[in-house]
Amino acid sequence: MLTITAPAVDKFKQLLQERGMEGGYIRLAISGFGWAGPKFGLILVESVNGQKETVEEFDGLKLAYDQGISTHLEGKIIDYQAGSQGFTITDQQPSPGCGSCS
C-alpha cells in the first residue's frame, strides 16, 4: 500500500493551485533503477491515460501511475519536508541493502 503524508498532500495541492491546475494530477513514474531499487519521479500533469494508468485519491489529491509499477509502490511513503529535502519517497520497512557494500 502506498502512503502520502499530510504535508506532502498539502504541498502537492499548493503546487497544483499555483500553476492553475486545481483539477490536475501528480504522476508517479520510475525514472531508473539503482542498487537499492527503483528511482521515482513526480510530475504535475493535467490529464492521465485512463487505460494504462491507475488513479488513487489521497484527501482530494489525485495520484496517477502506470499499472505496471504498482508492485514497486508497495510499502512506499511519499513525504514532504520544507527546505533542501523537499519530497522524498521511502520504504515503510527499508531493505537491508547489499551485504557486500562497505
Image (spheres, helix red, strand yellow):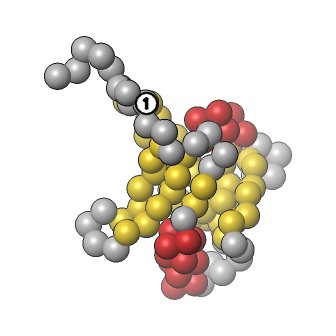
Is the C terminus in the top left, top right, bottom left or bottom right quadrant?
top left
Q: Which residue is mark 1?
A: 95
Circle 1 crowding by C-alpha within 10 Å: few under 14, some 14–19, many from 20: few
In this view, the residue in front, 31 or 79, is 79
Within the image, what quadrant is residue 72 found in? top right
Within the image, what quadrant is residue 101 found in? top left
Q: Residue 62 at x, y = what percent?
A: 69, 65
Residue positioned 66% across, 46% down in the render:
1
Q: Residue 45 at x, y = what percent?
A: 61, 64
Task: Residue at the far right: name it.
Answer: 51
**30 w.r.t. 47: above or below:** above
Q: How many marks?
A: 1
- Secondary structure at badge 1 equals loop
Residue positioned 34% across, 74% down in the render:
82
Q: Residue 60 at x, y = what percent?
A: 71, 74
Task: Residue at the far left: name it.
Answer: 102
Q: Residue 32 at x, y = what percent?
A: 44, 35
State left or right for residue 34 relative to residue 10: left
Res 39 visible: yes
In this view, the residue in front, 67 or 59, is 59
Within the image, what quadrant is residue 71 found in? top right
In this view, the residue in front, 80 or 34, is 80
Q: Callout 1, which amino acid?
A: Ser
Residue positioned 41% across, 61% down in the render:
87
State left or right for residue 15 relative to residue 71: left
Res 69 visible: no
